[in-house]
Amino acid sequence: MTRYNGQVTPDSLFNLLSDSTRLRITTLLALEGELCVCEFTHALRDPQPKISRHLAIMREAGLVVARRQGTWMHYRICPDLPDWANRIIETAAGEVHGMDPFRRDLRALGAMDERPGDRSCA
């Protein structure tokens, strides 16, 4: 598991969140905790390579950490982020989760059959 190494700065955080896909991923993580790549692809309705590319950027920047379970990669917001970064993420997620596309993402995720916590990714 990759750990936070002090790379997240205000500039880098806002740069990461300025991309719509990364903002949607971050919002889902803030609201749901740990999610598998298959859950992101289902919720955002984007192909796996696109989601994985954005997650790699986020991981390299120290925003998220990854955990492998079998063939599946699970992501969560880095627990070692500075408090200011966590407050920004939590506030943003709390304010936008009822707006589209975030609302649609949450609804799609909730309707997903066979989520990893249930058994395995579909």
Image: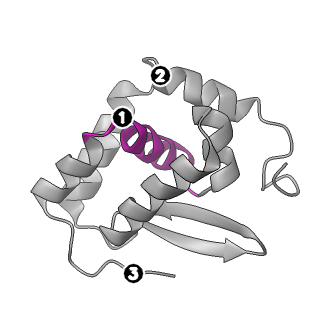
- Which type of secondary structure does the marked residue at label 1 adopt? helix
Single out the mark in the foreground, 1 or 3: 1
96, above or below 34, in the image:
above
Question: Range of the magenta residues?
Answer: 18-34
* Quarter-of-image position of residue 78: bottom left
- Residue of label 1: 20
- Residue of label 2: 101
- Which type of secondary structure does the marked residue at label 3 adopt? loop
**Residue 65 spot, x, y in % from top left:** 47, 70
Specify which label sits upstream in the sequence, 1 or 2. 1
Three-letter residue code for mark 2: Pro
Question: Is 24 in the magenta?
Answer: yes
**Residue at (33%, 27%) from the top-left corner?**
95
8, above or below 110, in the image:
below
**Residue 15 spot, x, y in % from top left:** 20, 49
Mark 2 nearby-residue class (10 Å; few <14, some 14–19, many ≥20): some
Three-letter residue code for mark 3: Arg
Instruction: Tell me, yes or no, whether the two marked residues, 1 and 2, touch with CB atoms within 8 Å.
Output: yes
- Please identify the dominant SS of the magenta region: helix
Mark 3 nearby-residue class (10 Å; few <14, some 14–19, many ≥20): some
Question: Is 32 in the magenta?
Answer: yes
